Amino acid sequence: MSTLAGKHIVLGLSGGIAVFKSAELCRALVKAGVTVQVVMTEAAEHFMTAVTLQALSGRPVYTSQWDPREANNMAHINLSREADAIVVAPASADFMAKLLHGGADELLSLMCLARPLDKVPLIVAPAMNREMWSNPATQRNVLQLKADGIHVLDVGQGDQACGETGDGRMLEAEEILEDLEAFFTPKVLAGKAVLVTAGPTYEAIDPVRGITNLSSGKMGFAIARAARMAGASVTLVAGPVHLPTPRGVQRVDVRSACQMLEAVQLHAHAAHVFIATAAVADWRPAHSADQKIKKDGSGVTPQLNFVENPDILATIAQSPRGASGELFCVGFAAESHDLLAHATAKRLRKGVPLLVGNIGPATFGQDDNALLLVDQSGARELPRASKQALAVQLIGDIAVRLTR
Ligand code: CTP
């Protein structure tokens, strides 16, 4: 379940063409279980009517500080006292300048000024033309807003409504949603660097053929996302998978087990936690042909010889940093039967403090899973749930282990 579920968010819209993304954001927030109260400036109403946002949020929209629906006629106080956060998206250049100076000549800025600083965080998603964004006045304002404790989200980059191209677009709705979810996630891994491997590896036979497996990478990607939400800086070394990179995660794409080992070794020295979820091929062809192997019509099939791939997890776990516990190593085991016995034996063989077992064929490519956490004192089951939810539980468990 999203950390946003059950939250009450005031979604403020200032004037900008990006309000069309706010409609999508409103919808996504409601879907995530958030109560959304929309407040619009007069400028925002030039771009979209309040009717649209009322329909999407299921609540009347506020546009005026003189709204007579409030018994005490103090919408700015009442709305901000109910909120878990105020999110202004889009935040125009003018609106940010106004926030900076404590301007309060309409409901949205008045409400931001009147919010209890210690209880109601203010998060803004800037949106403007690239020249406006890079103008020293805006950049100065952004720095000052941050210094004032306001959370200023990044801007996107690309084509702009005005026809120019550059920085200043408002983030997409799903990116803002990810950032809001991260904002509300307890930072149990703050200051930690987490390295994750995910997906299958691909071992080339020739330029067009190879050996791989059915790992989808979903579990590893979910773990990378959960670790980033928990405040870690995350590097994700991924085999060939078609999954979007979780927001805020540094991704390194590799193909073969040897490339994966190289990338992992490069990043392991700075990591505090290494989580090996990748389904690494145990063997690779001893020789990979430079050209496509052709049938010669004789009916004789090519003979493939294999060599064993390096064991990435064991290599890292048994390195000085892994063995000393300075780098906390977590292995995964995909088994087809006798999960507890195999996971227990594998934990010892790999030399890791924690091994996470799952039944491989039942989970490959699926969105849910069940995990068995095996350590030196025994085993604990994380019952069947979505891979996202299990990833959050696993990251919470690892964070506790780091403090022991
Ligand atoms: N692993 C690894 N490098 C390898 C093989 C496995 O890093 N060459 C890691 C996996 O990422 C996982 C753990 O080791 O974290 C266990 O992987 P698994 O394939 O289940 O185990 P194997 O060592 O291959 O053992 P077996 O095939 O006998 O079950």
Image (cartoon, rainbow, N blue to C red):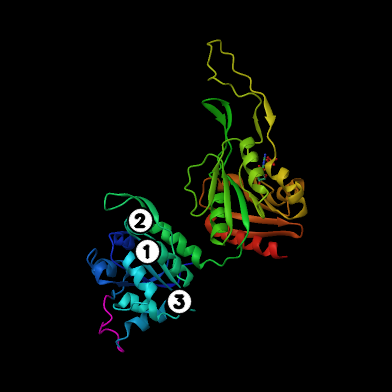
Q: Amino acid at mark 1?
A: Ala
What's the magenta region? 63-72
Foreground of the two, 28 or 154: 154
Foreground of the two, 65 or 380: 65
Where 78 falls versus 312 (above or below)? below
Q: Nearer the viewer, mark 2 or mark 1?
A: 1
Quadrant of the rendering where the C terminus is positioned? bottom right
Nearer-N-terminus badge (3/2)? 3
Pointers 3 and 1 in contact (C-beta within 8 Å): no
Residue 252 in sight in this render: yes
Give the main secondary structure, helix, strand or loop, of the magenta stretch.
loop
Q: Confirm if mark 2 falls within 8 A of ligand 1.
A: no
The numbered dot on residue 169 is 2
Q: Amino acid at mark 3?
A: Val
The numbered dot on residue 120 is 3
Residue 201 image point, x, y percent:
59, 37
The numbered dot on residue 137 is 1
Q: Is 78 left, or right, of 47 in this rendering?
A: right
